[in-house]
Amino acid sequence: MKPAHLAIAALLLIAASGCSRLEPWVKPYERENIADPIMAWDRDPVSTSYMQHVYDSREGARGASGASGGGCGCN
Amino acid sequence: MQLIRRIAQLFLLAPTAVAGVLPDDRADLMYHYYDGGGITIDGPSLLVRKKFAEKYAVNASYYVDMVSSASIDVVTTASPYKEERTQYGVGFEYLRGKVTYAASFSNSSENDYNADTASLSISQDMFGDLTTVSLSFTRGWDDVTRTGDVAFADTVDRRIYGVNVSQVATKNLILGLSFDTITEEGFLNNPYRQVRFVDPDAALGYSYEAERYPRTRTGNALALRGRWYLPYRAAMQADYRFYTDTWDIRGHTAEVSYTHPLDEEWTFDVHYRFYTQNAAEFYSDLFPREDFQNFLARDKELASMQSHTLGFGVAYEFKPAWAAFLGKATLNLRYDRIRFDYDDFSDLSTTGFAPGAEPLYKFDADVIRFFFSGWF
C-alpha cells in the first residue's frame, strides 16, 4: 500500500469516529492502572531517543519506534 | 560522519504529540556515553518543555556528539579522527479539543555534513479516549561534503510518513501499532568508506575502491507492542518490529522489558533486545574483482548481522530542597551492554589469513546515560 493510501485510510478512520457511538469498554474510573506513570510508553524521552539513535546508527532497520504519539486516554 | 545518524535524528525530533493532553513542564539534562568497536562518543543532551494555558506547548533541545573514532573501518583504510556533531531543535504543539497539532524543526551540523529536518503531526483521541491515532510527516534536507575535497558536494532528500495507534485494550493492557515509510533520494553512502576486491597483484591479496550505493532507498517498518500492568504494581512490555526495504534488507527486532517501582522513590528497569538482519543486495565482504557490479557496499550496517542488548536502569525520585520551583525531580542511571555479531564482515585487523578467510568481526559496546529530570 502506498503511503498516500495509508494516510487517506487513517484520515477516514478519524472522520468516521465522529459518527461512532461506540461505548468505551474500559470506563474512566477503571483507568487507574494504565494511568500509572510506570505504564507510559516513553517515560524518559531524552533517554529513549538517544538509544534509538544508537541503534539506527549501527543497524540497517529504522522507523516505527512509536516511542512518541502514544496515549492512555487517562486525561 | 554517518548518513544513518541523520535518520535517527529524524525520528528523534519527530513531534511528540500525545492527543488530549500536552506533555508536562519538564527539563531533562543528560550525559551520554558510548564505547564500542574502537569508537567513543559522549556529550550532553538537553530537552525543555513548557506549556501555556493548557493549549499550547513549546519545546527546545540541544544535543552534542563528541566522537573519537578508531573503528575497524578507520583502522584498516584510514586514520583515527575526532569530530563533533551539534544538534538544535524546537517544537510547538497546539491542543484543540481531542486533537493535538505539532510541528518541529531541527538542525544538525558537523564539519562535513549538515541536516535540516521539519516535521508535522496530528493526533486524535477517539472511542471514549481508549484509542489515540497519530499521523506524521517529516522532511529532511541534507548537505554532504567530504573533508579535503572541495569539489565534492551532494544532497539527500528524505520523506517519512508515519501512522501510530495506541489502544487501551483492558484496564491493565495497552497495545500499540506503528507504521513508517521512509523514502530517501541522493547521496546515500559514506564518501570515505571503501569496499575491497580480490587483487592478486596486491601484497594483501586484495585492494580497495570507493563504495557506490543506489541513489534511492525506500523502507517500511511495522511495529506491534503491548504493555501490561502486573497485579503487584509493576509493568512488563513486549515489542516486535519488522523492517524491509528496496535494498533487500529485512530486519526483525524483538524486545521485552520489566519496570519495578520500589516504595515511592525508586524505579528499576531491566530489558533485553534482539535484532537480526540479512545483508543488502549489493553488499559483499570481498568482491571478486574491481568494479564487479554497479553498486558496491562493504558497510557492516548493511551486512548480515545480529545484536543482543541487556540493559538496566534505576531512577530515584525526590523533591529538591535547593530548587523550590521544582515539583519533583529524578536522578537516573541507565546502562546497556550490546553485542554485535557479523555473519559476513571480516575482521581485517587480523593478519596471516588468506583473503576472505579472516575471522568474522564482532564487538561489545557499553552505553551509559546519566540524567536529571525536573518537573516544574
Image (cartoon, helix red, strand yellow):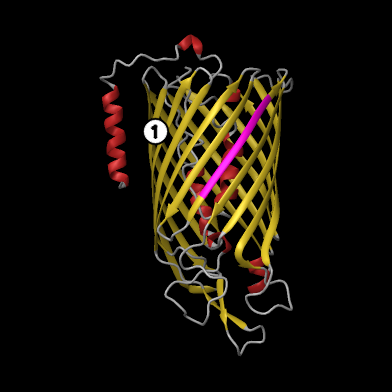
Residue at 54% across, 37% down: B239
- Locate residue A56 relative to residue B76 in the image: left or right: left
Q: Is residue B36 visible?
A: no
- Locate residue A41 relative to residue B371 in the image: left or right: left
Q: Is residue B16 visible?
A: yes
- Examine the image and state in which quarter residue B333 appears: top right
B56 w.r.t. B66: above or below = above
Quarter placement of the C terminus of chain B: top right
Residue B155 in the image, given as x and y percentages of width and height: 42, 62
Which residue reaches farthest top?
Answer: A29
Asked if the stretch drawn in magenta spans residue B375, the answer is: no
- Locate residue B75 relative to residue B227 in the image: left or right: right
Residue at 61% across, 82% down: B206
Closer to us: B195 or B275: B275
Residue of label 1: B134
Which residue reaches farthest bottom?
Answer: B201
Residue B307 in the image, given as x and y percentages of width and height: 62, 51
Closer to us: B364 or B161: B364
A39 w.r.t. B184: above or below = above
Chain under callout 1: B
- The range drawn in magenta is B252-260
